């Protein structure tokens, strides 16, 4: 599941189950009560919006129906597509390792061309980075 706001902040999750209970637990800390949740119309998002009192705008992902007024899900679809294309290079990813690949793509998108081996190793190990500041 991918969540993104208009400011470009995003989060992605590998869900164990795609049910209302799981989606509510994941989205509750991310979606403020005054937000408008835009989704493809899956029932779990309607359950979330109803349980949390959040406005829900359905934007069907059909040909010619990508936008409803000011609402769309194209940023999420774009991220989904970048993930799919990037993972094709791996020739299939085991579900067991999917969270690692999601983290890898997040890192690549965060650093872009500025990614380097030292940063990759530190992030992979979870080590804090020591930044050198010259005076």
Image (spheres, rainbow, N blue to C red):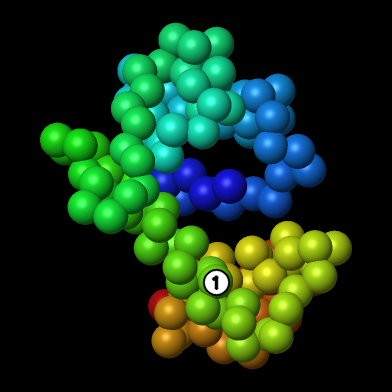
Q: Secondary structure at mark 1?
A: helix
The residue lying at 42 percent from left, 39 percent from top is 40
In the image shown, does 92 or 61 lie closer to the viewer?
Answer: 61
In the image shown, does 115 or 67 lie closer to the viewer?
Answer: 67
| Residue 7, horizontal then vertical, whole percent | 30, 47
Left or right: where 20 falls relative to 60: right
The residue lying at 80 percent from left, 63 percent from top is 95
Give the total number of marks visible in the rendering: 1
The residue lying at 70 percent from left, 23 percent from top is 21
The residue lying at 81 percent from left, 70 percent from top is 94
Left or right: where 6 falls relative to 1: left
Picture quadrant where residue 87 is located: bottom right
In the image shown, does 130 or 33 lie closer to the viewer?
Answer: 33
Provide the residue designation for mark 1: 84
**Camera sees residue 130:** no
| Residue 26, horizontal then vertical, whole percent | 63, 33
């Amino acid at each position: 599941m991918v969540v993104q706001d208009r400011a470009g902040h995003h989060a992605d999750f590998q869900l164990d189950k795609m049910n209302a209970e799981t989606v509510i637990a994941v989205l509750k800390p991310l979606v403020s009560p005054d937000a408008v949740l835009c989704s493809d119309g899956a029932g779990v998002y309607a359950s979330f919006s109803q349980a949390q009192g959040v406005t829900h705008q359905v934007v069907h992902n059909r040909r010619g129906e990508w936008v409803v007024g000011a609402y769309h899900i194209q940023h999420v679809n774009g991220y989904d597509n970048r993930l799919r294309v990037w993972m094709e290079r791996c020739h299939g990813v085991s579900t067991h390792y999917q969270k690692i690949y999601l983290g890898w793509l997040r890192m690549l998108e965060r650093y872009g061309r500025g990614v380097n081996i030292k940063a990759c190793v530190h992030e992979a190990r979870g080590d804090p980075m020591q930044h050198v500041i010259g005076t």
